[in-house]
Image (cartoon, grey):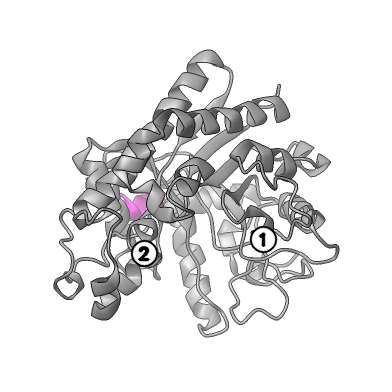
Amino acid sequence: MSHLTSFPFRRNHAMIRQAALASVFALSPVAASAEGFVGAYVWGGMIDTHVGIQRFYDTVDSALNNGFTAIRFKLGPGQANDYGITPDPCYGIKTLSCYAQVMFDSPVWDNPKLTTVILTALDFTAYLNEGGSNNGYVDTYNLAAHQAAIEAEYTGLFNVLQQRFAGRNVQFILSNWEGDNVVYCGSSYNYATNPAFAAKCVHPNNESNAQAAAGLVTWFGYRDQAVAAFVAANPSINLIQAPEFNAYSMFDSGCHGYCNAATDTVLAQIGAAGGRGYCSYSSYDTQGVPGSTYYSSITGILKTCKHMMIGEAGYDMAVKPQSMDLGLFQELYEIDTTAAIGVVPWHYADPANSPTKYGLVDHTGAPQDLLLMGPLTPIP
């Protein structure tokens, strides 16, 4: 494939760029010296040579064969619809562990190139006990009432991971869908920019914005406890949680009077709770080309999160020029080699006839944005 670069080139280029970026990251508490992973996100589309769950397996297989060592996908409500699984194998069960068994039920996961599995996981317990709503993840009353069941659901998921990848050196990262979107009625961007949207966005118990964001951090805490207990009982498993947020700078203007950036973002509430070892940043509000605010954003995040990954980044090539993606991938590469444990472009494969064009490959598996990744390109 064209545009592929050798591993030594990536390392040498990283050393040159690291010197240039030293001043940028001088204030951050952590600067990763090793190259982070490059992940493939399988959610926005799949290769459609086959039908049903086989499309998911084919897409994972394609990503691993193209050199990606980290695979990210979603687990949670709407799973069967999101991945075209017909009939729904977990109808009437609705647990993360049931769907995880389905998603991992293929030899494609035996590929030795796989080093990292990132799960965008939203448990059914909190969701269904809120009447089928993402408000369940911020409603502190609902969370407290079902804490034991929430933690048990994650323990069930971790048991599936432990059994499926027994004897393998694979790291598992538990994350979530963009946290600020969960708090702000599905779209923190609309909350920040559209006063009519913000006025209608009411939290489940009329909490303040800060209280609702703190509720999500409480949910993170329950997941922390499930992770810690499982790792203590199974010390050979490499399992961490990296909660994802997606508002860093978008609330700075005050949301037309509806928000306070100092207290109302998920990152602010993570900081208020004492910070974290790992976080994930879905970075659309600050991503850009070199010279933008991207690096200063990463520096700011590292004051609250000791380690971080870029959980999502990308441009819609249906409306953006190639130069935007070329610049973004270059910048993601620089971040990946200086400040992050890994980066995950959104997303791996476009669906057929998609109105947007984010895919690293198209719906047949043919290279698309993959040809623009430059030094970030994984090595098949």
Instruction: Judge by depth and name the residue closer to the eye, 170 or 327.
Output: 170
Whether the magenta-drawn stretch holds residue 20 is answered as: yes
Dot 2 surroundings within 10 Å: few (below 14), some, or many (20 or more)? some
Q: Position of residue 97 (x, y in %)?
A: 63, 36
Q: Position of residue 182 (x, y in %)?
A: 39, 57
Which residue position is annotated with label 2?
Answer: 185
Q: Is residue 359 left or right of residue 229?
A: right
- Height in image: 327 above or below 274? below
Instruction: Judge by depth and name the residue closer to the eye, 354 or 136.
Output: 136
Q: Identify the residue at image location x=46%, y=53%.
A: 131
Residue furthest to the right in view is 50
| Of callouts 1 and 2, the N-terminal one | 1
Q: Which mark is residue 40?
A: none
Dot 1 surroundings within 10 Å: few (below 14), some, or many (20 or more)? few
- Height in image: 46 above or below 126? below
Quadrant assignment for the N terminus:
bottom right
Whether the magenta-drawn stretch holds residue 131 is answered as: no
Instruction: Judge by depth and name the residue closer to the eye, 112 or 280.
Output: 280
Q: Is residue 172 left or right of residue 46?
A: left
Q: Identify the residue at image location x=32%, y=53%.
A: 298
- Give the residues drawn in magenta, as a range: 18-25
Q: Secondary structure at mark 2?
A: loop
Q: Quadrant of residue 50?
A: bottom right
Instruction: Name the kind of residue labelled 2 in the image.
Output: Cys
Q: Quadrant of residue 102?
A: top right
Instruction: Name the kind of residue labelled 1 in the image.
Output: Asn
Which residue position is annotated with label 1?
Answer: 81
Q: Quadrant of residue 141?
A: top left
Q: Identify the residue at image location x=45%, y=53%.
A: 310
Q: Position of residue 337 (x, y in %)?
A: 46, 48
